[in-house]
Amino acid sequence: MSKLTKIVMPLAVVGMAATAFMATPAKAEWQPKGPISVIIGFAAGGGTDTQARLIAAELKKRKGWNVIPSNVTGKGGVVMARKLKGLPNDGLTIGMAVTEVFGYNMLASKKAGYKTDDFTYIATTTSSQMGIVANTSKGWKTFADVIAAAKKGKVFKFAGMSAKHADINFLIEQKYGVKFNTVVLRGGRKVMNAIIAGDVDLGYGAGIQSKAVRSGKMVNLASGLSQRLKISPNAPTLVEMGIPYDIGAKFIFVAPAGIPGEARKALADAIGDIINDPSTKASQYVSKGYGGPDVITGKKLDAFIQNEIKIAKVLMKLMK
């Protein structure tokens, strides 16, 4: 066999392989075999509910998927998660809540009835703009004003949305030698309504307060994030005030554990495309109220959830 033949034969084989590869049809994207049920862990009208419904409408428009939202509330998202874990893992039933539901709230609930690996984590949409909020009519400019009044003996009624917020309030009390009357209300909408009605003096808002802050009716007294809030750059962070914890959360879509990988990817890609597209109502909503899209998927999202668990355990250990 000549040297030329030795060279030509492999090239011929490569050509045949390339032709065969080109003839192989591309794998079709996963498609749901029926309506997709989205179980929302918080009440109608709040940030989680609004995002879920806007995304559902856009999925119908873009993909033709029939997405049906419903609300299953209770225990800061725990009731929804408990129900979701036992449902079929075919991609036709997913849930929407916040990352605390699969971290702090889960660990704090003695009867949560689920664990971290009971779920497949699909995609986050945005980060909360967690602030400590009050009516502007109270006259407080920052949380330091509240602390100053509390040191003089005034006991403020302070609303949180989870056990985590109650524990953070305890740390604030210990740090500054003050006392709050902490109440836990289920969802940001209920906290905002209680502040507006004067049933509580101040409370935590995860971004739902943004419209009222912009209009001047409410004020963010402090940021619960590790950085200052975009909408209220003059409000100090709790970290700056000596409470070294970022208590923000991310809004997240999840599914029962074990859904097909192609279903997870298709759902994550579709949700991410909607949130990252500034022309959609969902993207506009999170940009106006929550500082913009913050989409995490796949292995990065799994790692984020595990890190949230670690942080929650550290904080809970301090409470013992």
Image (cartoon, grey):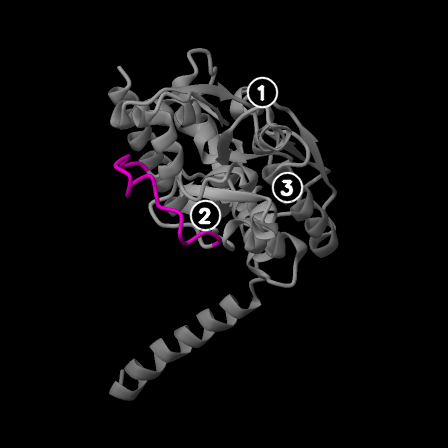
Residue 149 percent location from the top left of the image: 38, 29
- Binning the other alpha carbons within 10 Å of mark 2 as few (below 14), some (14 to 19) or many (20 upward) gives many
Element type where label 3 sits in the image? helix
Q: How many marks?
A: 3
Numbered range of the magenta stretch: 231-245
**Disc 2 to disc 1, C-alpha distance:** 26 Å
Q: Which residue is mark 3?
A: 52
Element type where label 1 sits in the image? loop
Question: Of the residues shown, which amino acid type is indicated by label 3?
Answer: Ala
Residue 143 as seen in the image, left or right of residue 95: left
Above or below: residue 309 compared with residue 298: above
In magenta stretch: residue 243? yes
Q: Which residue is mark 2?
A: 297
Q: Earlier in the sequence, mark 1 or mark 3?
A: 3
Closest to the camera, between mark 2 and mark 1, is 1
Q: Earlier in the sequence, mark 2 or mark 3?
A: 3
* Residue 112 visible somewhere in the drawing: yes
**Disc 1 to disc 3, C-alpha distance:** 17 Å
